[in-house]
Image: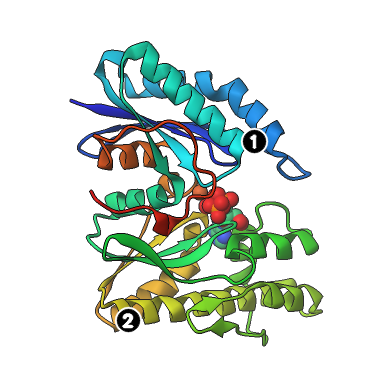
């Protein structure tokens, strides 16, 4: 059996995943940098440097795999914070030399998509990527993943967290908002879809200033933002002539969002699936799987500004 070790290090997470060439995830270990005051790239990189060896060792131990069975090493080459990307790249190159294993650098965002595809066994879906900083509707068009629509300001996760911070709900606020919303009823909030794009910051500002019961505001905030996403996802399915919708990113933990997307898909004869939570956030298994898809290539160095549609999908 052949295995790939994938090292993730684009932002807050340093991760190491081990995946078989058939697509079985054997280990997915990580250490996450947390700070009340935000992320200073060099401080995050220090954290990653300190933890990377331990995280890799933990992954090998969990997977019960020795170096002689690792036939490929992959790392997140971008996009991300350069000092963090260097940590993942340097470690991958060092281990590759030490053990005589080829090393390939992959795109972090593309890896989010392909691990979603692997986990949901979808063939050619429209992806709805709803995370902290990112909210995008993506689908494969020709030889590239194309972004059909996206947020014009902040990602939905960050929008929910911002609302939560103002209302003292703690961090991350998404799960708390989901709980409160169960006891809420409808109040009017602005709805903001512009073509295939969405925007959340105006809605959050309005929601924050509302004097209504917090349960009601949470309910309406969810209903409004999720309906916006369902609308653009439906349009993408129609426009791209696809019949699968794959939800990826941490906000995919929200049951109400899943329910709304499922209902929309059912009504138009499409399939809906959401990536399992342990493969939703930043982690090394997705980097390993993307490495396997790109086996045969080798790379050195980082690509901090590489966009999703810069990558040629040749696997
Ligand atoms: P990005 O991938 O865009 O850089 P990230 O890695 O920080 O961002 P994720 O880890 O994918 O994002 O997701 C984190 C976000 O998911 C947080 O903003 C959090 O509030 C949100 N979230 C988590 N659980 C839920 C939930 N049940 N309902 C809504 N939002 C949720
Ligand atoms: Fe990510």
Left or right of 228? Residue 18 is left
Left or right of 220? Residue 149 is left
Mark 2: secondary structure: helix
Residue at image point 70% right, 77% down: 202
On the question of residue 283 being in view, the answer is: no
Q: Which mark is residue 53?
A: none
Q: Is mark 1 within 8 Å of ligand 1?
A: no
Q: Considering only order in the chain, which callout, 2 or 1, is on the residue closer to the N terminus?
A: 1
Residue at image point 35% right, 61% down: 145
In which quadrant is the N terminus drawn? top left
Q: Nearer the viewer, residue 50 or 309?
A: 309
With respect to residue 149, does 28 lie above or below?
A: above
Q: CA distance from mark 1 to mark 2?
A: 40 Å
Q: Nearer the viewer, residue 163 or 97?
A: 97
Left or right of 160? Residue 307 is left
- Residue 236 location, x and y as percent? 37, 77
User: How dense is the environment of label 2, judged by Cα within 10 Å: few (below 14), some, or many (20 and up)?
Assistant: few
On the question of residue 176 being in view, the answer is: yes
Pointers 1 and 2 in contact (C-beta within 8 Å): no
- Residue 62 location, x and y as percent? 38, 23
Residue marked by disc 2? 239
Residue at image point 64% right, 69% down: 153
Residue at image point 63% right, 84% down: 186
Q: Which mark is residue 33?
A: 1
Mark 1: secondary structure: loop
Badge count: 2
Left or right of 217? Residue 28 is left
With respect to residue 237, does 136 lie above or below?
A: above
Ligand 1 lies in quarter: bottom right
- Residue 193 location, x and y as percent? 55, 83
> In which quadrant of the rendered view does residue 13 lie?
top right
Which callout, 1 or 2, points to the residue nearer the camera? 2
């Amino acid at each position: 059996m052949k295995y790939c070790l994938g090292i993730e290090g684009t932002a807050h997470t340093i991760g190491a995943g081990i995946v078989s060439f058939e697509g079985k995830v054997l280990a997915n270990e990580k250490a996450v940098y947390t700070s009340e005051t935000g992320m200073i790239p060099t401080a995050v990189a220090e954290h990653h440097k300190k933890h990377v060896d331990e995280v890799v060792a933990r992954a090998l131990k969990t997977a019960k795999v020795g170096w002689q069975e690792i036939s490929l090493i992959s790392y997140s080459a971008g996009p991300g914070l350069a000092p963090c990307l260097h940590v993942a790249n340097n470690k991958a190159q060092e281990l590759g030399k030490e053990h005589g294993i080829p090393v390939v650098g992959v795109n972090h965002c593309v890896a989010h998509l392909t691990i979603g595809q692997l986990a949901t066994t979808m063939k050619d879906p429209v992806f709805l990527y709803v995370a902290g900083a990112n909210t995008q509707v993506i689908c494969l068009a020709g030889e590239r993943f194309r972004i059909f629509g996206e947020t014009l300001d902040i990602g939905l996760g960050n929008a929910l967290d911002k609302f939560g911070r103002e209302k003292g709900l703690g961090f991350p606020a998404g799960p708390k908002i989901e709980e409160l919303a169960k006891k809420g009823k409808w109040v009017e909030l602005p709805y903001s879809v512009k073509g295939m794009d969405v925007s959340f910051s105006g809605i959050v500002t309005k929601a924050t200033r509302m004097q209504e019961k917090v349960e009601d505001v949470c309910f309406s905030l969810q209903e409004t933002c999720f309906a916006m996403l369902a609308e653009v996802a439906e349009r993408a399915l129609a426009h791209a002539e696809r019949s699968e919708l794959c939800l990826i990113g941490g906000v995919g933990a929200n049951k109400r969002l899943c329910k709304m997307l499922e209902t929309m898909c059912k009504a138009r004869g499409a399939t809906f699936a959401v990536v399992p939570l342990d493969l939703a956030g930043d982690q090394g298994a997705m980097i390993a799987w993307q490495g396997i898809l790109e086996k045969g290539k080798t790379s050195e160095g980082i690509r901090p500004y590489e966009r999703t549609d810069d990558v040629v999908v040749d696997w």
